[in-house]
Amino acid sequence: MITAPDLVVAVGPALFETVVAGQGDTEVRDVFLADPQEPATGGPGDLVLGLGLRNAEEAVELLERCAAGNASGVVLRTGLAQEPAVVATAERWLLTLIALQPTVTWAHVVWLLRGVIDRAAAPDSPAAGDAGVHQELFALADAAAAIVDAPVTIEDNQSRVLAYSSQQDLSDTDPTRVSTIVGRRVPAEVIAHFRARGIFRRLARSSEPFLVPDGPNGIRPRLVVPVRAGGEWLGSIWAVVDGPVSQEVTEELSNAASVLALHLLRLRAQADVARRSAIDRLRTVLRQFSPEAPVEVRLPSPPWRVVALNSPDGYDVPQQLDLWESLGRRQGWSEPLLADLDGTVFAVVSDGEAVPGSWRWLRKLVGDQAKDNPGTAAAAGGRARYPADLPSSRAEAVELLNLVRRGVARGPALRVEQAWHVLTVHRAVTSLDTTKMDGPLATLLRHDIENDTAFVDTLEAWLNHPGQPQQAAKDLHLHTNTLRHRMKRIGEIARLDLADPRERLALQLQIASVRTEH
Protein backbone atom coordinates (compact mmCIF):
# COMPACT_ATOMS: atom_id res chain seq x y z
CA MET A 1 0.00 0.00 0.00
CA ILE A 2 1.21 3.53 -0.80
CA THR A 3 -0.25 6.66 0.83
CA ALA A 4 -0.28 10.33 -0.12
CA PRO A 5 2.58 11.16 2.30
CA ASP A 6 4.54 8.25 0.77
CA LEU A 7 4.09 9.83 -2.66
CA VAL A 8 5.29 13.21 -1.43
CA VAL A 9 8.44 11.56 -0.06
CA ALA A 10 8.93 9.48 -3.21
CA VAL A 11 8.54 12.38 -5.63
CA GLY A 12 10.48 14.81 -3.45
CA PRO A 13 10.03 18.19 -1.77
CA ALA A 14 11.26 20.00 -4.89
CA LEU A 15 7.84 19.36 -6.39
CA PHE A 16 5.45 18.71 -3.51
CA GLU A 17 4.67 20.11 -0.09
CA THR A 18 2.09 18.69 2.31
CA VAL A 19 -0.19 21.55 3.43
CA VAL A 20 -2.78 19.47 5.35
CA ALA A 21 -1.88 15.95 6.48
CA GLY A 22 -5.49 14.73 6.65
CA GLN A 23 -5.88 11.00 7.20
CA GLY A 24 -2.34 10.04 6.30
CA ASP A 25 -2.94 6.28 6.24
CA THR A 26 -5.37 6.40 3.29
CA GLU A 27 -4.21 4.25 0.37
CA VAL A 28 -3.60 5.81 -3.06
CA ARG A 29 -4.29 3.47 -6.00
CA ASP A 30 -4.63 5.89 -8.90
CA VAL A 31 -4.42 9.50 -10.07
CA PHE A 32 -7.61 11.32 -11.08
CA LEU A 33 -7.51 14.47 -13.23
CA ALA A 34 -10.43 16.65 -12.09
CA ASP A 35 -12.18 18.87 -14.62
CA PRO A 36 -13.83 21.94 -13.02
CA GLN A 37 -16.52 21.78 -15.71
CA GLU A 38 -17.50 18.22 -14.86
CA PRO A 39 -19.33 17.00 -11.71
CA ALA A 40 -17.34 13.77 -11.49
CA THR A 41 -14.58 13.62 -8.89
CA GLY A 42 -12.23 10.88 -7.81
CA GLY A 43 -13.40 8.23 -5.40
CA PRO A 44 -11.73 6.07 -2.76
CA GLY A 45 -8.09 5.39 -3.63
CA ASP A 46 -7.78 8.38 -5.98
CA LEU A 47 -5.32 11.24 -5.59
CA VAL A 48 -7.15 14.10 -7.31
CA LEU A 49 -5.24 16.69 -9.33
CA GLY A 50 -6.98 20.07 -9.49
CA LEU A 51 -6.29 21.22 -13.05
CA GLY A 52 -7.69 24.45 -14.45
CA LEU A 53 -8.99 25.90 -11.18
CA ARG A 54 -9.29 29.68 -11.43
CA ASN A 55 -9.85 30.77 -7.84
CA ALA A 56 -10.22 29.67 -4.22
CA GLU A 57 -13.99 29.21 -4.56
CA GLU A 58 -13.53 26.56 -7.25
CA ALA A 59 -10.80 24.91 -5.18
CA VAL A 60 -13.07 24.76 -2.10
CA GLU A 61 -15.85 23.24 -4.18
CA LEU A 62 -13.45 20.60 -5.53
CA LEU A 63 -12.26 19.71 -2.02
CA GLU A 64 -15.83 19.31 -0.79
CA ARG A 65 -16.68 16.99 -3.69
CA CYS A 66 -13.50 15.00 -3.07
CA ALA A 67 -14.35 14.67 0.62
CA ALA A 68 -17.85 13.47 -0.27
CA GLY A 69 -16.33 10.88 -2.61
CA ASN A 70 -13.76 9.76 0.00
CA ALA A 71 -10.82 10.61 -2.25
CA SER A 72 -7.36 9.95 -0.81
CA GLY A 73 -6.11 13.50 -1.27
CA VAL A 74 -5.98 16.57 -3.51
CA VAL A 75 -3.06 18.25 -5.29
CA LEU A 76 -3.36 21.98 -6.08
CA ARG A 77 -0.96 24.65 -7.28
CA THR A 78 0.85 26.29 -4.37
CA GLY A 79 -1.06 29.57 -4.66
CA LEU A 80 -4.47 27.90 -4.30
CA ALA A 81 -3.33 25.26 -1.82
CA GLN A 82 -2.25 27.94 0.66
CA GLU A 83 -5.44 30.01 0.46
CA PRO A 84 -6.96 30.18 3.99
CA ALA A 85 -10.41 29.04 2.84
CA VAL A 86 -8.92 26.08 0.98
CA VAL A 87 -6.77 25.06 3.95
CA ALA A 88 -9.74 25.38 6.34
CA THR A 89 -11.88 23.15 4.08
CA ALA A 90 -9.20 20.47 3.92
CA GLU A 91 -8.77 20.57 7.71
CA ARG A 92 -12.52 20.38 8.30
CA TRP A 93 -12.86 17.26 6.16
CA LEU A 94 -9.53 15.72 7.25
CA LEU A 95 -8.55 15.65 3.57
CA THR A 96 -4.88 15.46 2.59
CA LEU A 97 -3.93 18.63 0.69
CA ILE A 98 -0.68 18.78 -1.29
CA ALA A 99 0.83 21.88 -2.90
CA LEU A 100 2.52 21.63 -6.32
CA GLN A 101 5.26 24.04 -7.28
CA PRO A 102 4.16 26.46 -10.05
CA THR A 103 7.05 25.70 -12.43
CA VAL A 104 6.17 22.01 -12.88
CA THR A 105 3.85 20.84 -15.69
CA TRP A 106 0.85 18.70 -14.81
CA ALA A 107 1.82 16.13 -17.46
CA HIS A 108 5.19 15.64 -15.77
CA VAL A 109 3.52 15.33 -12.36
CA VAL A 110 1.06 12.70 -13.56
CA TRP A 111 3.87 10.78 -15.19
CA LEU A 112 5.93 10.76 -12.03
CA LEU A 113 2.98 9.86 -9.77
CA ARG A 114 1.81 7.06 -12.05
CA GLY A 115 5.35 5.72 -12.09
CA VAL A 116 5.49 5.52 -8.28
CA ILE A 117 1.98 4.03 -8.00
CA ASP A 118 2.46 1.52 -10.80
CA ARG A 119 5.79 0.33 -9.48
CA ALA A 120 4.29 -0.13 -6.03
CA ALA A 121 1.76 -2.54 -7.66
CA ALA A 122 -0.33 -3.21 -4.58
CA PRO A 123 -0.55 -7.00 -4.12
CA ASP A 124 -4.17 -6.90 -2.89
CA SER A 125 -5.51 -5.26 -6.01
CA PRO A 126 -8.04 -7.70 -7.53
CA ALA A 127 -7.25 -6.54 -11.05
CA ALA A 128 -3.51 -6.71 -10.75
CA GLY A 129 -2.45 -10.15 -9.61
CA ASP A 130 0.65 -10.20 -7.39
CA ALA A 131 3.15 -7.37 -7.30
CA GLY A 132 6.02 -9.57 -8.51
CA VAL A 133 4.76 -9.83 -12.09
CA HIS A 134 4.35 -6.08 -12.36
CA GLN A 135 7.79 -5.39 -10.95
CA GLU A 136 9.22 -7.85 -13.47
CA LEU A 137 7.38 -6.10 -16.33
CA PHE A 138 8.91 -2.76 -15.33
CA ALA A 139 12.31 -4.44 -15.07
CA LEU A 140 11.83 -5.87 -18.58
CA ALA A 141 10.89 -2.41 -19.86
CA ASP A 142 14.10 -1.02 -18.37
CA ALA A 143 16.08 -3.89 -19.89
CA ALA A 144 14.55 -3.32 -23.33
CA ALA A 145 15.27 0.42 -23.03
CA ALA A 146 18.91 -0.38 -22.26
CA ILE A 147 19.14 -2.64 -25.34
CA VAL A 148 17.79 -0.05 -27.75
CA ASP A 149 19.00 3.01 -25.78
CA ALA A 150 15.54 4.60 -26.02
CA PRO A 151 12.36 5.00 -23.94
CA VAL A 152 10.14 1.90 -24.00
CA THR A 153 6.52 1.05 -23.19
CA ILE A 154 5.04 -2.45 -22.86
CA GLU A 155 1.42 -2.66 -23.98
CA ASP A 156 -1.20 -5.40 -24.16
CA ASN A 157 -3.20 -6.17 -27.31
CA GLN A 158 -5.79 -3.53 -26.33
CA SER A 159 -3.16 -0.73 -26.34
CA ARG A 160 -3.22 -0.49 -22.55
CA VAL A 161 0.09 0.37 -20.90
CA LEU A 162 1.36 -2.43 -18.63
CA ALA A 163 4.83 -1.01 -17.87
CA TYR A 164 7.31 1.54 -19.10
CA SER A 165 11.01 2.23 -18.75
CA SER A 166 12.15 4.49 -15.93
CA GLN A 167 13.82 6.89 -18.33
CA GLN A 168 11.65 10.01 -17.92
CA ASP A 169 13.59 12.82 -19.56
CA LEU A 170 10.86 14.74 -21.36
CA SER A 171 13.36 16.11 -23.85
CA ASP A 172 14.16 12.56 -25.00
CA THR A 173 10.66 11.52 -26.01
CA ASP A 174 7.53 12.96 -27.64
CA PRO A 175 4.08 14.13 -26.44
CA THR A 176 2.47 10.84 -27.48
CA ARG A 177 4.60 8.83 -25.04
CA VAL A 178 3.74 11.29 -22.26
CA SER A 179 0.00 11.02 -23.04
CA THR A 180 0.24 7.24 -23.25
CA ILE A 181 1.70 6.92 -19.76
CA VAL A 182 -0.47 9.67 -18.26
CA GLY A 183 -3.64 8.04 -19.61
CA ARG A 184 -2.42 4.43 -19.13
CA ARG A 185 -3.29 3.71 -22.74
CA VAL A 186 -2.45 4.99 -26.21
CA PRO A 187 -4.53 8.12 -27.00
CA ALA A 188 -7.49 7.49 -29.30
CA GLU A 189 -6.23 9.81 -32.05
CA VAL A 190 -2.85 8.05 -32.06
CA ILE A 191 -4.55 4.64 -32.25
CA ALA A 192 -6.57 5.92 -35.22
CA HIS A 193 -3.35 7.06 -36.92
CA PHE A 194 -1.63 3.71 -36.36
CA ARG A 195 -4.74 1.77 -37.41
CA ALA A 196 -4.98 3.74 -40.66
CA ARG A 197 -1.39 2.73 -41.41
CA GLY A 198 -2.18 -0.95 -40.81
CA ILE A 199 0.04 -1.20 -37.72
CA PHE A 200 -2.40 -3.28 -35.66
CA ARG A 201 -3.16 -5.67 -38.52
CA ARG A 202 0.57 -6.28 -38.83
CA LEU A 203 0.92 -6.79 -35.06
CA ALA A 204 -1.91 -9.33 -35.07
CA ARG A 205 -0.42 -11.37 -37.90
CA SER A 206 3.36 -11.09 -37.66
CA SER A 207 6.10 -11.89 -35.18
CA GLU A 208 8.76 -9.75 -36.86
CA PRO A 209 9.81 -6.36 -35.41
CA PHE A 210 9.20 -3.39 -37.68
CA LEU A 211 9.76 0.38 -37.77
CA VAL A 212 6.86 2.85 -37.72
CA PRO A 213 7.80 6.17 -39.38
CA ASP A 214 7.23 9.49 -37.69
CA GLY A 215 3.75 10.96 -37.80
CA PRO A 216 1.75 14.14 -37.20
CA ASN A 217 1.78 16.18 -33.98
CA GLY A 218 5.36 15.30 -33.08
CA ILE A 219 5.01 11.50 -33.18
CA ARG A 220 8.58 10.22 -33.48
CA PRO A 221 9.54 6.93 -35.18
CA ARG A 222 8.97 3.76 -33.17
CA LEU A 223 10.43 0.30 -33.28
CA VAL A 224 7.57 -2.12 -32.58
CA VAL A 225 8.17 -5.70 -31.46
CA PRO A 226 5.12 -8.03 -31.38
CA VAL A 227 4.83 -10.31 -28.34
CA ARG A 228 3.30 -13.68 -29.13
CA ALA A 229 2.86 -17.08 -27.53
CA GLY A 230 1.73 -20.12 -29.48
CA GLY A 231 0.56 -17.92 -32.34
CA GLU A 232 -1.56 -15.72 -30.05
CA TRP A 233 -0.84 -11.99 -30.04
CA LEU A 234 -0.49 -10.90 -26.41
CA GLY A 235 0.99 -7.42 -26.67
CA SER A 236 3.93 -5.44 -27.95
CA ILE A 237 7.08 -3.48 -27.09
CA TRP A 238 7.25 0.11 -28.37
CA ALA A 239 10.59 1.95 -28.39
CA VAL A 240 10.85 5.65 -29.35
CA VAL A 241 13.84 5.76 -31.73
CA ASP A 242 15.40 8.23 -34.15
CA GLY A 243 15.33 5.84 -37.09
CA PRO A 244 16.27 2.29 -38.15
CA VAL A 245 18.18 0.20 -35.61
CA SER A 246 20.75 -2.53 -36.15
CA GLN A 247 19.90 -6.18 -36.75
CA GLU A 248 21.70 -7.09 -33.56
CA VAL A 249 19.50 -4.77 -31.46
CA THR A 250 16.37 -6.06 -33.18
CA GLU A 251 17.29 -9.67 -32.41
CA GLU A 252 17.95 -8.84 -28.74
CA LEU A 253 14.57 -7.15 -28.49
CA SER A 254 12.94 -10.21 -30.08
CA ASN A 255 14.55 -12.37 -27.41
CA ALA A 256 13.21 -9.99 -24.75
CA ALA A 257 9.76 -10.33 -26.34
CA SER A 258 9.92 -14.12 -25.88
CA VAL A 259 10.60 -13.65 -22.18
CA LEU A 260 7.89 -11.01 -21.96
CA ALA A 261 5.34 -13.41 -23.48
CA LEU A 262 5.71 -15.75 -20.50
CA HIS A 263 5.16 -12.87 -18.10
CA LEU A 264 2.05 -11.73 -19.97
CA LEU A 265 0.62 -15.25 -19.89
CA ARG A 266 1.31 -15.40 -16.16
CA LEU A 267 -0.24 -11.96 -15.62
CA ARG A 268 -3.36 -12.97 -17.56
CA ALA A 269 -3.69 -16.19 -15.57
CA GLN A 270 -3.32 -14.35 -12.28
CA ALA A 271 -5.80 -11.68 -13.33
CA ASP A 272 -8.29 -14.38 -14.32
CA VAL A 273 -7.88 -16.17 -10.99
CA ALA A 274 -8.21 -12.88 -9.11
CA ARG A 275 -11.31 -11.98 -11.12
CA ARG A 276 -12.96 -15.33 -10.45
CA SER A 277 -12.14 -15.03 -6.77
CA ALA A 278 -13.62 -11.53 -6.60
CA ILE A 279 -16.79 -12.72 -8.35
CA ASP A 280 -17.13 -15.66 -5.95
CA ARG A 281 -16.75 -13.39 -2.91
CA LEU A 282 -19.32 -10.91 -4.21
CA ARG A 283 -21.69 -13.75 -5.13
CA THR A 284 -21.50 -15.04 -1.56
CA VAL A 285 -22.30 -11.61 -0.10
CA LEU A 286 -25.23 -11.12 -2.48
CA ARG A 287 -26.70 -14.52 -1.67
CA GLN A 288 -26.65 -14.24 2.11
CA PHE A 289 -24.45 -12.03 4.26
CA SER A 290 -23.16 -13.71 7.42
CA PRO A 291 -22.00 -11.44 10.27
CA GLU A 292 -20.37 -14.49 11.90
CA ALA A 293 -18.20 -15.16 8.86
CA PRO A 294 -18.10 -11.97 6.75
CA VAL A 295 -16.61 -12.23 3.28
CA GLU A 296 -13.92 -9.70 2.35
CA VAL A 297 -15.25 -7.61 -0.54
CA ARG A 298 -13.85 -4.21 -1.44
CA LEU A 299 -16.91 -1.93 -1.59
CA PRO A 300 -17.14 1.82 -2.13
CA SER A 301 -18.55 4.03 0.61
CA PRO A 302 -22.20 3.25 1.48
CA PRO A 303 -25.03 3.46 0.68
CA TRP A 304 -25.08 0.97 -2.18
CA ARG A 305 -27.62 -0.51 -4.56
CA VAL A 306 -27.66 -3.93 -6.14
CA VAL A 307 -28.57 -3.67 -9.83
CA ALA A 308 -29.90 -6.56 -11.93
CA LEU A 309 -28.66 -6.25 -15.52
CA ASN A 310 -30.29 -7.50 -18.69
CA SER A 311 -28.47 -7.94 -22.01
CA PRO A 312 -29.84 -8.30 -25.54
CA ASP A 313 -30.87 -11.80 -26.62
CA GLY A 314 -28.15 -14.14 -27.80
CA TYR A 315 -25.79 -13.92 -24.83
CA ASP A 316 -25.40 -16.61 -22.21
CA VAL A 317 -24.70 -15.60 -18.60
CA PRO A 318 -20.85 -15.77 -18.77
CA GLN A 319 -20.94 -13.71 -21.96
CA GLN A 320 -23.25 -11.18 -20.30
CA LEU A 321 -20.83 -10.89 -17.38
CA ASP A 322 -17.90 -10.31 -19.75
CA LEU A 323 -19.97 -7.84 -21.76
CA TRP A 324 -20.90 -5.69 -18.76
CA GLU A 325 -17.36 -5.83 -17.35
CA SER A 326 -15.84 -4.72 -20.66
CA LEU A 327 -18.43 -1.96 -21.03
CA GLY A 328 -17.87 -0.72 -17.49
CA ARG A 329 -14.09 -0.65 -17.81
CA ARG A 330 -14.27 1.22 -21.13
CA GLN A 331 -16.40 3.86 -19.45
CA GLY A 332 -14.02 4.38 -16.53
CA TRP A 333 -15.14 1.82 -13.91
CA SER A 334 -11.67 0.49 -13.12
CA GLU A 335 -12.76 -2.30 -10.73
CA PRO A 336 -16.31 -3.35 -11.66
CA LEU A 337 -18.25 -5.04 -8.83
CA LEU A 338 -20.04 -7.62 -10.96
CA ALA A 339 -21.18 -11.18 -10.33
CA ASP A 340 -23.66 -13.65 -11.75
CA LEU A 341 -26.10 -15.43 -9.47
CA ASP A 342 -28.98 -17.77 -10.36
CA GLY A 343 -28.81 -16.83 -14.04
CA THR A 344 -28.72 -13.04 -13.60
CA VAL A 345 -25.79 -10.61 -13.74
CA PHE A 346 -25.63 -8.14 -10.84
CA ALA A 347 -23.67 -4.97 -10.19
CA VAL A 348 -23.10 -3.37 -6.80
CA VAL A 349 -22.94 0.40 -7.24
CA SER A 350 -22.70 3.40 -4.95
CA ASP A 351 -25.74 5.63 -4.54
CA GLY A 352 -23.91 8.95 -4.47
CA GLU A 353 -22.40 11.25 -7.08
CA ALA A 354 -22.48 10.43 -10.77
CA VAL A 355 -19.01 8.87 -10.92
CA PRO A 356 -18.04 5.57 -12.57
CA GLY A 357 -19.45 2.79 -10.42
CA SER A 358 -22.46 4.80 -9.19
CA TRP A 359 -26.15 4.21 -9.94
CA ARG A 360 -26.53 7.55 -11.73
CA TRP A 361 -23.54 6.76 -13.93
CA LEU A 362 -24.82 3.26 -14.69
CA ARG A 363 -28.34 4.52 -15.41
CA LYS A 364 -27.00 6.85 -18.10
CA LEU A 365 -24.74 4.13 -19.50
CA VAL A 366 -27.66 1.69 -19.78
CA GLY A 367 -29.86 4.35 -21.37
CA ASP A 368 -27.22 5.09 -24.00
CA GLN A 369 -26.68 1.39 -24.73
CA ALA A 370 -30.41 0.67 -24.99
CA LYS A 371 -30.73 3.11 -27.91
CA ASP A 372 -28.72 0.80 -30.17
CA ASN A 373 -29.20 -2.51 -28.32
CA PRO A 374 -32.87 -3.22 -27.52
CA GLY A 375 -33.19 -5.49 -24.51
CA THR A 376 -30.50 -3.70 -22.51
CA ALA A 377 -31.97 -2.88 -19.10
CA ALA A 378 -31.07 -2.32 -15.46
CA ALA A 379 -33.23 -2.54 -12.33
CA ALA A 380 -31.87 -1.22 -9.04
CA GLY A 381 -32.98 -2.55 -5.66
CA GLY A 382 -33.39 -0.41 -2.58
CA ARG A 383 -30.57 1.30 -0.73
CA ALA A 384 -28.24 -0.90 1.28
CA ARG A 385 -26.46 0.87 4.12
CA TYR A 386 -24.80 -2.25 5.52
CA PRO A 387 -23.47 -5.42 3.83
CA ALA A 388 -26.32 -7.36 5.47
CA ASP A 389 -28.77 -5.29 3.37
CA LEU A 390 -27.30 -6.39 0.03
CA PRO A 391 -29.28 -9.67 -0.35
CA SER A 392 -32.56 -7.77 0.16
CA SER A 393 -31.55 -5.16 -2.43
CA ARG A 394 -30.67 -8.01 -4.82
CA ALA A 395 -34.08 -9.64 -4.40
CA GLU A 396 -35.84 -6.35 -5.15
CA ALA A 397 -33.66 -5.83 -8.23
CA VAL A 398 -34.56 -9.28 -9.59
CA GLU A 399 -38.26 -8.71 -8.98
CA LEU A 400 -38.17 -5.34 -10.73
CA LEU A 401 -36.11 -6.58 -13.69
CA ASN A 402 -38.66 -9.33 -14.32
CA LEU A 403 -41.39 -6.68 -14.53
CA VAL A 404 -39.25 -4.62 -16.93
CA ARG A 405 -38.73 -7.68 -19.14
CA ARG A 406 -42.50 -8.27 -19.25
CA GLY A 407 -43.20 -4.64 -20.06
CA VAL A 408 -45.14 -4.09 -16.83
CA ALA A 409 -42.56 -1.57 -15.57
CA ARG A 410 -41.00 0.95 -17.91
CA GLY A 411 -37.24 0.69 -18.53
CA PRO A 412 -34.55 0.72 -19.60
CA ALA A 413 -33.17 1.76 -16.21
CA LEU A 414 -35.15 2.39 -13.03
CA ARG A 415 -35.01 1.84 -9.29
CA VAL A 416 -37.58 0.38 -6.93
CA GLU A 417 -38.65 3.78 -5.60
CA GLN A 418 -39.82 4.72 -9.11
CA ALA A 419 -41.92 1.57 -9.48
CA TRP A 420 -43.32 1.11 -5.95
CA HIS A 421 -46.92 1.03 -7.19
CA VAL A 422 -46.16 -1.58 -9.86
CA LEU A 423 -44.31 -3.72 -7.32
CA THR A 424 -47.11 -3.41 -4.75
CA VAL A 425 -49.74 -4.61 -7.21
CA HIS A 426 -47.46 -7.36 -8.50
CA ARG A 427 -46.82 -8.70 -5.00
CA ALA A 428 -50.52 -8.66 -4.17
CA VAL A 429 -51.43 -10.35 -7.45
CA THR A 430 -48.84 -13.11 -7.20
CA SER A 431 -50.02 -13.96 -3.69
CA LEU A 432 -53.48 -14.91 -4.98
CA ASP A 433 -54.32 -18.54 -5.76
CA THR A 434 -56.31 -18.48 -9.00
CA THR A 435 -57.30 -22.16 -8.55
CA LYS A 436 -59.40 -21.17 -5.55
CA MET A 437 -60.94 -18.02 -7.01
CA ASP A 438 -64.55 -17.33 -6.11
CA GLY A 439 -66.96 -14.41 -6.27
CA PRO A 440 -68.35 -12.57 -9.31
CA LEU A 441 -65.16 -12.84 -11.39
CA ALA A 442 -65.26 -16.65 -11.22
CA THR A 443 -68.86 -16.50 -12.47
CA LEU A 444 -67.93 -14.21 -15.36
CA LEU A 445 -64.97 -16.40 -16.32
CA ARG A 446 -67.19 -19.48 -16.53
CA HIS A 447 -69.76 -17.54 -18.59
CA ASP A 448 -67.09 -16.35 -21.05
CA ILE A 449 -65.80 -19.92 -21.51
CA GLU A 450 -69.24 -21.46 -21.95
CA ASN A 451 -70.76 -18.73 -24.15
CA ASP A 452 -67.72 -17.28 -25.95
CA THR A 453 -68.33 -13.82 -24.53
CA ALA A 454 -65.80 -11.21 -23.41
CA PHE A 455 -67.39 -9.91 -20.22
CA VAL A 456 -64.15 -10.09 -18.19
CA ASP A 457 -62.42 -7.85 -20.77
CA THR A 458 -65.36 -5.46 -20.62
CA LEU A 459 -65.27 -5.31 -16.82
CA GLU A 460 -61.50 -4.77 -16.85
CA ALA A 461 -61.74 -1.78 -19.22
CA TRP A 462 -64.58 -0.31 -17.13
CA LEU A 463 -62.50 -0.59 -13.94
CA ASN A 464 -59.40 0.80 -15.62
CA HIS A 465 -61.28 3.97 -16.64
CA PRO A 466 -63.57 4.87 -13.75
CA GLY A 467 -66.15 7.47 -14.77
CA GLN A 468 -64.86 7.45 -18.37
CA PRO A 469 -67.11 5.10 -20.36
CA GLN A 470 -66.05 6.71 -23.66
CA GLN A 471 -62.39 5.83 -23.02
CA ALA A 472 -63.27 2.31 -21.88
CA ALA A 473 -65.36 1.81 -25.02
CA LYS A 474 -62.51 3.11 -27.17
CA ASP A 475 -60.11 0.54 -25.65
CA LEU A 476 -62.59 -2.23 -26.50
CA HIS A 477 -63.39 -0.81 -29.97
CA LEU A 478 -67.05 -0.56 -29.00
CA HIS A 479 -69.73 2.08 -29.11
CA THR A 480 -70.44 3.62 -25.69
CA ASN A 481 -74.04 2.38 -25.74
CA THR A 482 -72.82 -1.16 -26.49
CA LEU A 483 -70.47 -0.92 -23.51
CA ARG A 484 -73.29 0.20 -21.21
CA HIS A 485 -75.47 -2.66 -22.45
CA ARG A 486 -72.70 -5.17 -21.69
CA MET A 487 -72.18 -3.74 -18.20
CA LYS A 488 -75.91 -4.10 -17.56
CA ARG A 489 -75.75 -7.72 -18.70
CA ILE A 490 -72.68 -8.32 -16.46
CA GLY A 491 -74.70 -7.03 -13.51
CA GLU A 492 -77.42 -9.57 -14.29
CA ILE A 493 -74.97 -12.50 -14.50
CA ALA A 494 -72.81 -11.69 -11.47
CA ARG A 495 -73.70 -9.77 -8.35
CA LEU A 496 -71.46 -6.68 -8.38
CA ASP A 497 -71.33 -3.59 -6.21
CA LEU A 498 -69.00 -1.33 -8.20
CA ALA A 499 -69.74 1.55 -5.84
CA ASP A 500 -67.70 -0.26 -3.16
CA PRO A 501 -64.01 0.73 -3.58
CA ARG A 502 -62.82 -2.46 -1.86
CA GLU A 503 -64.83 -4.61 -4.29
CA ARG A 504 -63.41 -2.70 -7.26
CA LEU A 505 -59.85 -3.19 -5.93
CA ALA A 506 -60.46 -6.90 -5.29
CA LEU A 507 -61.83 -7.40 -8.81
CA GLN A 508 -58.83 -5.60 -10.36
CA LEU A 509 -56.38 -7.73 -8.38
CA GLN A 510 -58.20 -10.94 -9.38
CA ILE A 511 -58.22 -9.93 -13.04
CA ALA A 512 -54.52 -9.06 -12.92
CA SER A 513 -53.81 -12.41 -11.28
CA VAL A 514 -55.63 -14.25 -14.06
CA ARG A 515 -53.74 -12.27 -16.70
CA THR A 516 -50.44 -13.11 -14.98
CA GLU A 517 -51.26 -16.82 -15.02
CA HIS A 518 -51.85 -16.65 -18.76
Image (cartoon, rainbow, N blue to C red):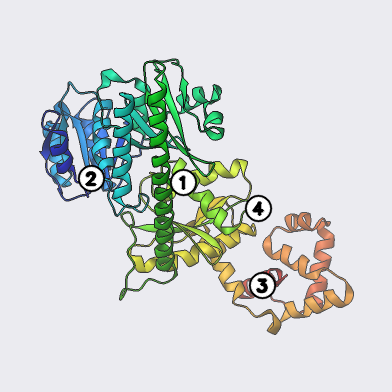
Query: Where on the picture, by quarter, is residue 38?
Result: top left
Left or right position of 140 against 445: left
> Tag 3: residue type?
Ser
Q: Which of the two discs, 3 and 2, labels the residue nearer the N terminus?
A: 2
Towards the viewer: 469 or 376: 376
Give x and y (percent) for residue 267: 39, 48
> Tag 2: residue type?
Ser
Residue ID for mark 4: 314
Give x and y (percent) for residue 385: 34, 62
Residue ID for mark 3: 513
Q: Nearer the viewer, mark 3 or mark 2?
A: 2
Name the mark on residue 72.
Answer: 2
Residue ID for mark 1: 328
Res. 495 visible in picture = no
Left or right position of 474 against 287: right
Q: Give the distance between the C-alpha atoms of the residues marked 3 and 4, in whole angstroms.
A: 31 Å
